[in-house]
Structures are given as structure tokens and as C-alpha cells.
Image (cartoon, grey):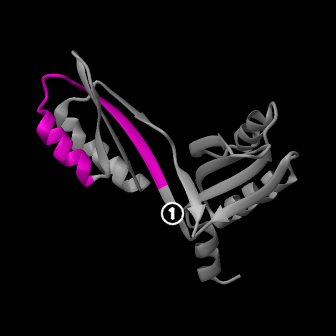
Amino acid sequence: MNNFNHYYDSEEIRRVVSVIVLNEDNVLSRIVGLFSARGYNIDSLTVAPIPQSEYSRITIVTNGDRRIIDQIVKQLNKLIPVLKVNEHQNMIEKDTVLIKFPIDQDISNIDVIARAYHGSIQNVTEDAIFVSATDSPSRVANFITVMQKFQPLEIVRSGVVAMER
């Protein structure tokens, strides 16, 4: 193997993997156990049932070199009741964040910034302003950074969902 191939194989990459599984008990714990037992990290994990079916889609964002990613995909394919594993490369990715701000913050500035990130004010109570935004994971991360100046009380991210183009 030449040095280029060695470099390419050992380069750290971010990968989104979708796993279609039968919607039954312990499936998620078995998948998470696979990652844990091998020391692989999960950056994001989202699970939802597939409408009008007995299946669920598990979307996992992970990092590793090419060899590790290949190993993850092979191990996931061996698990029962996994039906299909897709390692996405050309996809649309979305992440959602919900942020709670103190009511004394400038609501008009919060609204203007939220709209720039495909977001909006979702609710206002006597104590707080609630804002959500849905965008690419990197833009959601940037939105969270920008919104720090409004002193958020709480921040919750949904995790990545992805679909092949």
C-alpha cells in the first residue's frame, strides 16, 4: 500500500448512517451496544417509526477513519432485525434546536436572527421566549453560537435526520 492510500484510509471522516429496523423491543439498545462495545462514538442518534409500516429508521452520525466506518456498516448489517443499512454520502441533512430565553430579552432581534436560520418564535409565556430553528447541522451549531448573546436558559437539539438525494 502506498502512502496516499494509507493517508486516505486513516483520515477521520464524519458519516451519516441510516438503519431500517423492525420496530421491536431492544433493537436500539443492541445497536448502541455495538458502538459501545467497539469504542465507537455516536455524535447524534435519532429514531422514529416509518409511517404505515412496522419499521423504524435510526439515523446515526459518527466519526472514524474509512476502516472504522466500513466495520460499523458491516456489524450493523449482521444485527437482526436490521433490514437495511445506508451509509449516506449525497444527502439532505436537517437538525432542529429549541431554545428558551428569558422574557426580558429583545424579542424582535431574536425573531430576526431566528428567521435567518429557518426558525421562528414558537411560544411566549410570562417568563420565557421559545424559539426553534431547523437547518443543516453546521448552521444550527452556528445559530446556537449566535444566540448565546441573548443568554439562553435552555437549549435542546433534536439530532440529525437525513435522506438520500
Residue 105: where, in percent of width, then height?
Answer: 13, 28
Residue 33: where, in percent of width, then height?
Answer: 75, 37
Asked where in the image residue 147 lies, by quadrant, the reply is top left
- In this picture, is 123 found above or below 32? above
How many marks the image carries: the answer is 1
- In this picture, is 6 found above or below 77? below
Q: Residue placed at 56% from the left, 67% from the top?
A: 11
Q: Which residues are magenta?
A: 94-116
> Relative to the observer, which residue lies in front, 86 or 40?
86
User: For the view shown, which residue lies furthest in the top direction?
Assistant: 126
Asked where in the image residue 111 lies, by quadrant, the reply is top left
Q: Identify which amino acid the numbered label 1 is placed on.
A: Ile
Q: Residue placed at 59% from the left, 57% from the top?
A: 16
Query: Split into 4 quadrants, where in the image is the N terminus?
Result: bottom right
Residue 87: where, in percent of width, then height?
Answer: 67, 63
Residue 27: where, in percent of width, then height?
Answer: 79, 37
Q: Residue placed at 26% from the left, 29% from the top?
A: 152
Q: Residue placed at 80% from the left, 59% from the top?
A: 74
Residue 103 is inside the magenta segment: yes
Asked which secondary structure carries label 1, the reply is strand
- Left or right for 145, reference 45: left
- Left or right for 2, reference 82: left
- Left or right for 29, reference 60: right
Name the residue tied to disc 1. Answer: 92
- In this picture, is 91 found above or below 159? below
Residue 84 is inside the magenta segment: no
> Relative to the observer, which residue lies in front, 44 or 63?
44
> Relative to the observer, which residue lies in front, 110 or 44?
110
- In this picture, is 84 found above or below 1? above
Asked where in the image residue 162 lies, by quadrant, the reply is bottom right
> How crowded is the residue under tag 1: few (<14 C-alpha within 10 Å), some, or many (20+)?
few
